[in-house]
Structures are given as structure tokens and as C-alpha cells.
Image (tube, grey):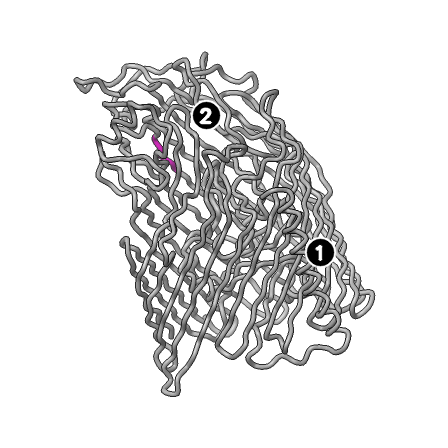
Amino acid sequence: MSAIQRKRTIHLLSTILASAVAPCWAFAAQAEEAPAADDALPEITVTAERRAESSQKVPLAIQSIDGETLAKTGYTSVTDLQYTMPGVQYDPTQGAAFQIRGVGSTSFDFSNAKSVSVVVDDVVMDGQRANGLTGLVDIDRVDVLMGPQGTLFGKNATSGVIAVSTTKPKLDEWSLRASASFGEHDERILNATANVPLGPIAALRVSGFDQAFDGFGRNVTLNRKVGSQHEYGGRARLYLEPSDSFNLILSGDYAYHWDSSVRTPVSGQSAAVTAILNELGVYPGPQSADTADSSFGQIVTEEWGTSLRANARLGDHDLTSITAYRATRYDNWTPASLTPYDRYAYIPFNLGQLDTDKFSQEIHLASPTGGFVEYLVGAFYNRLHARQTQLQWSTGGQPLYDSAGTPLPTLIALTGAIGEDGNTSLFDSVNETMAAFGQLKFNFTPRFALTLGGRYTHDNNSQSIDYVTINPEPIAGYTPAFTASSAAPAYEFGRVKGDNFSFRIAPTYQVADNVMLYATYSTGYKPAGIAFVGNKYAPYEDETVKAWEAGIKSEWFGRRLRFNLDAFRSDFKDFQATILTQIPDGAGGTINATVIGNAGGLRTQGIEGSLVVQPMRGLQLSGAVTYTDAKFTNYVYNATTNYTGSRLTNAPEWSGTAAIDYDHEFGSGLGFKAHADYAYRSEYWTVVGQPAYSHVSGYGLVNGRLSFTLPNRPIEVGVYARNLFDKYFSTGWQQYGVLGLLHYTSPNARRTVGGFVNVSF
């Protein structure tokens, strides 16, 4: 989009905003809203400010989806939330992480904090390579808080928070819900939830899931499908309420994930490699998901944890404590050779084993609401320990086996070091955070209020690299000698400490009971870190952001129409960005590696709007759109590389969603339900400054669902279609040295049709 087109677009959106606000203001000045009818839109209750309140009263852009609506979309993973909320994106490459408003640094470095925090039941899920949630079962709601959230939410997230709330156990209620879906590509989605009362003061809620599907690529050498997935797990929550002034929730969860999603060739391979692939029936291209590697790439993740949430009523104040422990295991076997090893090999052995554990403690005290001053004060502690072994054994481009089947006597240990014993890197890192936070809200008049928030954070991050010897026999099938590709770093241990004060100022004006204008100014911070890239010690600086936001939140016609609109801008300094660089491959050449460093400046700005209408009971229409202009304002990587002015990766300018839901009960008691949703995002690219080869064209996805319910609605039977029009897209591109251009393919990039049965008692 040219500068002139962009100015015209912004002018048009500004005109729409002004046109929308003007009649709202005029109408509100004349009369208050009428009381909501029984068929009005349900109120959305969030805990964005660590206390339950209406989303329409919080001076912050929030996108929300409840568990029932989420189930109707047919999506099964927390990463699929990107297709339900504009402005949210997930990058599966370079460490994997969410982005909000175009911003979300992804890195393989263990010191790097996530720009977007995933928080499940008030616990920050900060384990590297993990999101803390796999199956979307028994979800109460998901709230996405846009922009810096450094004041109240656990770790200091500079771009936003995805807050997931699972369903709380209910006293005096026996219930059982189960669902089974079966579709194309051997897709199965099974889950069940039971709520069991345990006397008058306790209840137990248990849920479990098992889901899987086949990929649509294939490894022709091994005759196995590429891109398949299987995951299962469960959650249990025990609720105790011994008195009206005290309650406890003890939670535990476990999740297992396996997938065979690996990089497959697109273009740029040598003529020799291309000829081998074509001979075997693999034709590289932007829609190919096939490979001919002699090893089967796969990733296994396990996550488990427990938390205790205690709430005590002290007079008219609420004291809340949240204690959590979590652990993850992440094993990746991702070879990079593309062809059978007796024809050509590059990195036939690429194995990483990561274990993390974390402990966190939060405590906060909240005052009652409704007075002249409302306040909340608290403290937070988090310690995350990560330990990973990583081996990359390369042939330097030679076949691993000769014509007689004899393996190469020497392999290049890209994860070893010249002058050091060991063929494998061992990383050990500890990220420790301590913070004190608070918020004051002054209700100067029934209509005008001012919120002031602040947070002091102290970070202590350390990381070391060592070199160990792993027996190659179980991995390679023989015992080669090893040579390293580069020298050990001058420093094999590093520590960085940081202190920061972030704050937030948010005035609000209640034009009418259901119309609020607000503005916010906030700051945010991410700590500095340590990185080792190609055996080089490469620390990076902390990241800060200043953000502005202004908007309107409104409900009309007896709360049958909800309209929210906001404009935002965030300016980042020393943004922790990732970029490809080259390191020695041990054979006289280089291999691309991802390095993290600081971009001097980054700006993201845009407009977000959402509309929900319930014209009649049982019918709901909704839509949301986001325009995001996210660019580096200062990013000089070296003397010859300047990315200033480049758009951020995985940051489409336009994204939007639309949905329609219809629920009708006939006189016989038979019910009918229909749902359709659409998600769109405009073009973007996945590698900084490389739009030519990492370009992803704009695309839209349509999902549909039709079902019938029996009288009293204990059984629901229906059909579903995900990606109804079979729209293909790729989720990530990588230029991988001599292997050329590779990419990942999403399972959502194909049509899946199936049927389901839901049972509830």
C-alpha cells in the first residue's frame, strides 16, 4: 500500500469513527439506555484489572470469545485463536509465539521473554516452546487484552495478554458433557467434562480430551504422512468454599502433543537435489508438503502443572493468592536433508531436548468498588529454569552413506566447539522476576473516572553454554568421529539484571450508562537477555514501549447492539527482533541461523472495531476488523543491511472476522442450530526484509456448522466444515542455506468435513 493510499485509508477510517461517535454522543445526551430485555446480548465479564467487571467498563481494547462460540468454530488448539480474533497472529517458526498488533518477538534464545503472555487461570505460561494449553476443552472464555500489559498481569508483556479462563467447578450440580467428532483426514476430536459435588462446600470438575488428524504431505522415502498430529490430556479442579468469606481452587493439568510438521522444500534447491526429489516424486513448490528425508521429523511436547488459588474476604476487601508450579518437556527431531542419505545429506541428525520448570507466586489485595477511590496492590515472583541439549551433526553436503552402504567416518558437530570436548551443546538458563504493582481508580463523578497504575520490576537472567558428549550409536546407528565448525565463545556464562518502572494512565467518561469514552497512555518493558549464536556470546538490551489508545465502548437498543472502536499507537525502543545470520558449517561454507538483537525503533499503529447485533432472540451477527501499520523505524543490522521502513513479519495490514449464529426451538421441542464464521487477513511475509521469497498472499477461511437437538436438548447431532472453500496458505517460510527455501504447512490450509455428537446430562 502506497503512502497516499495509506493516508486515504486512515482518513476514511477516521471519518467512519467520527460518523459513528457523533450520533452516539447526540443520542446519549438526550436519554439513557432502556433496560436490557431478556433477549439482549449477554454481558461479558472479564478480569482484565484483576477483578470481575463488565468488559464495557474497562478502559482497554479487549477481544473476547466464550467457550461455546469457540467450540462452534471447530478449532482445536490455542494457536488457532489467531483465526477468531483480528490483530492476533501466531508464528510457528523461530521458537513459536503469538503476536498482537503485529508485535511479538520470537527467538530460540532462552532468556527472551514473550511479548504476548498466555495466562491460564491467572498463571503465566512462560515456558519456552510451550503455550500452557493444548486442547480447547471446558473453556469458559478467552480474553485478549491488546497493547502493553505491564501494570497488573504477572510478567511484563509489551504487546498484550491472552487470558484463558477454564470453567470453575459448581457446587450442588451434577453434570456430564461429552463430545465426539469425526471427519476427513482421519480427524477425531473426543472430549468429556464431569462436574461432581462433594458435599455442601466442595465440588470437583474433571475434563479430558483426545484429538488427532493425518497430515496431507508425505515422506516418500519412509512412506509416512507429514503434518500429522495427536494430542491428549486432562484437567482437574477442586473447589472448596468452607465459608462465604473464603474459598480455594486446587488445579492440576497434563497435556501431551505429538506432530510430524516439518519443513518441506519450496524452491532454490540445487539442480542435483531437485533432480533427486523429482525422481522420487517430490516436486518442490509453494503448495507442496512432501519430502524425501531418510529420517522422520517429529516434535513431542509434554506439559503439566498445578496451582492453588485462595481468596479471602477481609471485611469489604478481597485478598487473593495464586501459587503455581509447572514443567514442560520439549523434544524435537527435525532433520534437514530433504533426500535419502545415500544420495545427499546436509544435517541428517538434528535433535533437541528441552526441560523447563517454573514456580510463581502472586498475591494481591483489592478494595471494594463504587467508592471515590478503588485500589488494588500486589506482588509477583516468578522463576523459570530451562535446560536443553541440542545436537546438529552435519555431513557438509556429502551423502551419509557411500554406494557400498558405508557411513561417513567423520561428521561435523555444528553444536560442538573447536578446542572443547563434546558433540552437543548444553544450555542452562534461569529467568527470575520480582515485581510490585498497584492501581488506583478515582471516581471523581458518576461519569468521570481516572485510573493510575504502576509496576516496579526487577529481573535477573542468567544463561550458560557447555559442551557434552552424547553417544551417537542410538541416534546415527554407528560411532563416527566429530569435528567442530567454530570455536567456543570467549564467555560461556552471562548474567544481566534490570530494573524498570512501568505505568498506565487511563481517564474514562461515561457519556451514558452504556456508552463510555476512554483513553490510555501506558509503558511496558522486557528484560535484557543472553544469547549464544554459532558459539558466539551475543547479549542484547532490554526493550521498552510507550503506547497510546483511545476509543468508545457502547451498547444500544436495550443492549441488542454492541459497538466498540479504538485507535492505537505503540512506539518501541530497542525492540528485541530476530533475523537470519550466517555461521560456519565446518565445510568451508555457512549455514543460516536465527540471531536475536535490538532494533532501534519500531512503531505499530492502527484502528480496531467490533460490532455485535442480536436483532431477534436466537439470532446473532458479529464482526470485527483491524487495520495495523507495523514497521521498523530504525533497524540497521550491519553496515550493509538496513531494515528501517520494513514491515514486521507475520503482521498483515488488514484482518477481520465475521460470524452468524442462529438457534431456534420448534414447538415439538426439537432444536436447530446454525453457525458460520469467516476469518480474513491480508498479505504478509515471514522473514524480516525478505518479502520476495517469504510472501504469504492474503486469504480467508470459512467454517460452518449445522446441528439438531432433541427435546430438552440432552443430545445434539450435526455436521461441520472447516475451511469450507479449501483455501490453501502457508504458515512460514525459511531460507535454509544450501537447502534453499523451505516452508511449513498448516493443517487448517485444507477443507475438513465431518460429523459430531454432543451429549449433556
At 49% from the left and 41% from the top, the residue drawn is: 357
Q: Secondary structure at mark 2?
A: strand
Q: Please, which residue is most extreme toward the bottom here? A: 667
Q: Position of residue 679 (x, y in %)?
A: 47, 56
Please indicate whether residue 232 sits to the left or right of residue 314 in the image: left
Would you say the residues marked 2 and 1 are in contact, meaning their CB atoms lie under 8 Å apart? no
The residue positioned farthest toward the left in the image shown: 404
Magenta span contains residue 333: yes
Quadrant location of the C terminus? Answer: bottom left
In the rendered image, the quadrant that contains the N terminus is: top right
> Can you give x and y, in whole percent of width and height, for residue 229 in the image?
33, 48
Judging depth in this view, the residue of 177 and 447 nearest the camera is 447
Question: Residue pushed farthest right?
Answer: 444
Whether residue 488 is visible: yes
Numbered mark located on residue 550 in the image: 1
Foreground of the two, 55 or 677: 677
Looking at the image, the residue that sits furthest to the front is: 4
| Mark 2 Cα-neighbour bin, 10 Å: few <14, some 14–19, many ≥20 | some
Instruction: Name the one closer to the observer, 605 or 88.
Output: 605
Secondary structure found at label 1: strand
The magenta segment: 331-335
Residue 451 picture quarter: bottom right
Residue 745 lies in quadrant: top left
Q: Is residue 155 visible?
A: no
- The amino acid at mark 1 is Ala
Badge number at residue 592: 2
